[in-house]
Image (spheres, coloured by chain):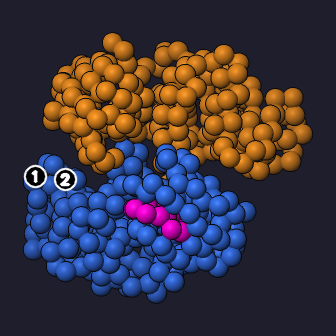
Chain colours: A orange, B blue
Amino acid sequence: MNYPLLTPDASFDTVILGNGYFPKHALALQLLAHTPYICCCDGAATHAIEQGYMPHAIVGDGDSLPQELKIKYRDILHIVSEQSDNDLTKATRHCSALGMRRILYLGVTGKREDHTLANVSLMVHYHRDMGIVPLLLTDYGYFVTAEGSHTFGSFCRQQVSIFNFGCTQMAGSGLKWAPVTPESWWEGTLNEAVGDSFTLRGNGLYMVFRTLEPKK
Amino acid sequence: MNYPLLTPDASFDTVILGNGYFPKHALALQLLAHTPYICCCDGAATHAIEQGYMPHAIVGDGDSLPQELKIKYRDILHIVSEQSDNDLTKATRHCSALGMRRILYLGVTGKREDHTLANVSLMVHYHRDMGIVPLLLTDYGYFVTAEGSHTFGSFCRQQVSIFNFGCTQMAGSGLKWAPVTPESWWEGTLNEAVGDSFTLRGNGLYMVFRTLEPKK
C-alpha cells in the first residue's frame, strides 16, 4: 500500500500549521499532539499556543503575529520578508532545510478561498520541486500528491476526488466510476471507493482527496 | 468598468445556492434578499427555508433533501438523477434553460475542500461552454471569470488573486506587483490593488478573486 489510510499513529517529520481554520477533527488534533516538530506560519502560532500546542518554529513575514508574541518567542521566530512566496512556502523551506520530508499540513484551508486554492496546489510544487512528501489534512478529508501507479487505502463509500496536474493519461480500478483523465479540476471529483483499496495509474502528477467519513 | 466592485444593489438574474457554508456576510444576504429568483442545490433548500429565503426551484439528485421537504416542495422540485454532473451544474442548466445568464453563486464553498475546488473551477466551464456570466461570492471575497482585456473595480489594499485557465500571456496594471502569466494556481495569488481600478490583459480565460475587505 503506497498511500495507506491516515490513522492517528501515522508518522510525520513535522506539522506545518497554517493560518486558516484551526483543525477541530480528533484525527488532526491527535497527529498534532504526537508529531515531534510543529512549525507555525506566522499568526497561526497565536492559535496553536492558545490551544496548548507549543511551536518549535514560527516562520513567516511577521505581518500577522502580535508584537508581544514576537518578543516572547524571538528564539524560535524566523522572519523571512521576501514577498514572492507565501508563509506556507517559507515554513516548508525552513523544515526542508532541517532535513524534514514527510510533512503534515494542517490549518491551510478555510477563510480566504484564494488562499485555499493556492495552498492546495502548492503541495504539487513541494512534491515536484522540493522532494517533500506532503499530506494536507482538513476536517473533511486529506490530499496527497502522487505520480505514476499507486495503491490507495480506502473504505467502502469513502468519497474520492482526483485532481490532475499534468497527466495526459490516467486510469485505475477500485472506484465506483472508472477514472478517466480529468481535463479540468471538476472532472475527477465525486468518485467513491468500493472496498479497502483502489489503484490509480497516471503518467504525471496528480492529487488524491479522500474523505474522513463515508458518504451517508 | 467591465467588472465593477460588487455592491448590494448589483443585479443578477438568479441566485444559485449551493450546499456549502450558508452565507453570513451582509452583502451576500442583501443580494439573496433582492435577487428575483433563488435556485437551491438539493439540500441547500433546507438552510435557505430555515433562514427565511423561499426558493423558486430546488434542483439536484435529491440525495441530500429530507423526504418531508421533497413532498412539501414537489411543485418546485426538479430531480435530475444523472451522475456525471454535480448539483451545481444541474442547477446552472436549469437556470440557463430559463434564459438566465447573470448568475450569483452563494454557498458553494466551505465543507469538503474537493467540492470547493471543483465548484470554483466549474465557473470557467459555465462561462466558456454555457455563456453564463458567473459571480461566485463567499464571506471573504468573490470570483469572476474573464477573457481578454478588462478593467476591474477595486479599492486601496484590496487583496487580489488571479487564476489562469489557459492564458499563455498575461499582463496588467494597477496592482502592487505587475501581473505575470501564472503557470500554477499559486503564482497569481497575493496581489493587491493600489487604487480604484486595475486592468488585466490575458489571451485566454482567467478568474479574478477580490476580497471584500482591505488588508489590515
Secondary element at image label 1:
loop
Residue lying at 51% horizontally and 60% vertically, measured from the top left: B170
Q: Is residue A140 left or right of residue A214?
A: right
Tell me the amino acid under the disc marked 2.
Asp
Q: Which quadrant is home to the C terminus of chain B?
A: bottom right
Q: Is residue B202 magenta?
A: yes
Q: Is residue B98 left or right of residue A109?
A: left
Percent from the top left, x then y, of residue B196? 64, 79
The disc at residue B66 is: none
- Residue named by callout 2: B85
Percent from the top left, x then y, of residue A29? 55, 29
Badge 1, how many Cα within 10 Å: few under 14, some, many 20+? few
- Residue named by callout 1: B82
* Residue sitting nearer the eye, A44 or B182: B182
Q: Is residue B168 magenta?
A: no
Q: Chain of mark 2?
A: B
Residue A61 falls in which quadrant of the image? top right
Residue range in magenta is B200-210
Q: Chain of mark 1?
A: B
Tell me the amino acid under the disc marked 1.
Glu
Percent from the top left, x then y, of residue B214? 67, 68
Residue A15 falls in which quadrant of the image? top right
